[in-house]
Amino acid sequence: MSTAGSPPNSRIKGTVLISRLNLVRQQGGQARLEEVLKRLPPMDQALLRKMILPINWYPFELNLRLDEAIADVLSPEDRTQAFMDMGRASADENLKGAQHVFVRPGEPQFLLSQAPQIYRFYYAVGSRTYEKTGPKSATLRTFGAENVTETDCLTIVGWHQRAIELSGGRAVRVAHPLCVAKGAQHCEYLCQWD
């Protein structure tokens, strides 16, 4: 299931698409979702109108186009926040659902230590590492990911902010000082909380 120009393994789980579609429905119902879908190519619209299965793999490029359309509709004046909100919504939906085993109240480090396994729930290519850097801080690094974009990295920042909050972290900060989309060799996420 690859799109033109994408490597054949460049895929993402259906759970990501589902969380995005649900976020749009929550922010404006079916009418708002139709507004988003109309911004997409006909093939994308047809695929997204079908039942998306959480465990199936879908083209990563489809997710990027959907994210752009959502940001255009929901928050054209603050696209950065729109992408972070998409990540937060994904964490809410998945960590309160099928991936709830990764959340232990009062233990953000446990969740972050599972980053290599969690990565596999979302992406088919690449890997993520975890390094505890203090009692309330950790560094995550992503290696070998395909089609890295600044906007997808913003969704990852939002996902980890919300995931740490769900695990009991307060005043969560996630910085993204190194990004493959900006020429770095890997992506790096510095996580801190109170």
Image (cartoon, grey):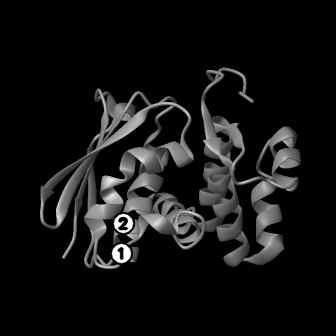
Disc 1/disc 2 C-alpha distance (Å):
6 Å
Give the image location of residue 182, x and y in percent.
Answer: 34, 33
Residue at position x 88%, y 53% from top? 50
Residue 63 appears in the rendering = yes
- Which residue is the site of mark 2? 161
In the rendered image, the quadrant that contains the C terminus is bottom left
- Which residue is the site of mark 1? 165
Give the image location of residue 144, x and y in percent.
Answer: 41, 27
Residue at position x 66%, y 20% from top? 5
- In-image side of 43 versus 169 (left or right): right
Residue at position x 78%, y 76% from top? 29
In the rendered image, the quadrant that contains the N terminus is top right
Residue at position x 69%, y 40% from top? 57
Q: Which kind of residue does numbered mark 1 sit on?
A: Glu
Q: Which kind of residue does numbered mark 2 sit on?
A: Gln
Tell me, yes or no, whether the two marked residues, 1 and 2, touch with CB atoms within 8 Å: yes
Are there few (<14), some (14-19), or many (20+) residues within 10 Å of tag 1?
A: some
Q: Nearer the viewer, residue 49 or 134?
A: 134
Give the image location of residue 4, x and y in percent.
Answer: 72, 22
Secondary structure category for the residue under label 1: helix
Give the image location of residue 153, x and y in percent.
Answer: 42, 47
Image quadrant where residue 90 sits:
bottom right
